Amino acid sequence: MNLKKKLWRLLSVLSILLLVILPISGCDYSFSAESNTETGTYTTLSETTDYTSDSATEQNKTSNIESGNTSTTEKKQIDETDGYLDKDGSYTSKEDIMNYLIEYGQLPNNFITKKEAKKLGWSGGSLEPYAPGKCIGGDYFGNYEKVLPVVSGRTYHECDIDTLNAKSRGAKRIIYSDDGQIYYTDNHYKSFTLLYGDDVQ
């Protein structure tokens, strides 16, 4: 009888211990799980944030590179367009004639000399009635007033500027030398501006 009571008491104590120990163990486990969950969440957020930041950085780099490429391409196209003159084209502006002389070393095909124009009936003034689409150019320029540099062995030639389909020859001329100097006058030889070359003014 005493043995049964002792066993009963022992079982009761064990039951109480189990009731006390299990909840405590469960709390620890729950806390540990929560802690791990929080840590895991933080890591994930950190990784996500870093990834987002890296992604944004890469996008910015890509955007900058693309922008740079576009700018370079556009600039290249502009430079090529500005610098390209068809050898068979007709030109009469100061810039085009200068670039044509630099590129090809001669005047465009729409220029004819005074001698050639006179054969067509021209005697002065506008060339349009006698040679439509043509301009006067290619004649020898004497530099008799010595307004331009006098260099041994150098010869100058001239051409009209802005006279394509015009009613008069005007006062604009380009004077170019056989050694690569290009001058411009807009007042019929009274003064000149060096457009291209190494002459010292």
Image (cartoon, helix red, strand yellow):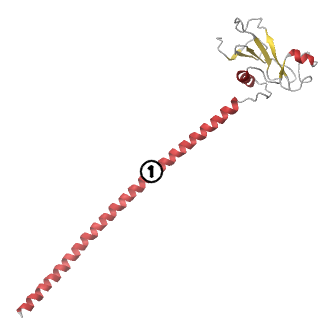
Q: Position of residue 10 (x, y in %)?
A: 11, 85
Task: Determine the image quadrant of residue 138.
Answer: top right
Q: Does residue 185 appear to the left or right of 49 in the view shown? A: right
Instruction: Identify the image quadrant of the N terminus.
Output: bottom left
Q: Does residue 125 appear to the left or right of 66 in the view shown? A: right
Q: Position of residue 130 (x, y in %)?
A: 92, 22
Kindly identify the amino acid type of the residue bearing the numbered disc 1. Ser
In the figure, 99 relative to 23: above or below?
above
Going 13% across and 82% down the picture, which residue do you hit? 13
Task: Determine the image quadrant of residue 121.
Answer: top right
Q: Does residue 54 appear to the left or right of 164 in the view shown? A: left
Total number of numbered labels? 1
Q: Nearer the viewer, residue 87 or 140?
A: 87
Q: Nearer the viewer, residue 88 or 52?
A: 88
Q: Residues within 10 Å of mark 1 (few under 14, many from 20)?
A: few
Going 47% across and 47% down the picture, which residue do you hit? 57
Instruction: Identify the image quadrant of the C terminus.
Output: top right
Q: SS for tag 1?
A: helix
Q: Residue furthest right?
A: 121
Going 22% across and 73% down the picture, which residue do you hit? 25
Q: Nearer the viewer, residue 137 or 41?
A: 137
Task: Determine the image quadrant of residue 153.
Answer: top right
Q: Position of residue 52 (x, y in %)?
A: 45, 53
Q: Does residue 108 appear to the left or right of 17 in the view shown? A: right
Going 66% across and 36% down the picture, which residue do you hit? 77
In the figure, 56 relative to 88: above or below?
below
Q: Position of residue 11 (x, y in %)?
A: 14, 85
Q: Residue furthest left?
A: 2
Q: Which residue is mark 1?
A: 53
In the figure, 146 relative to 90: above or below?
above
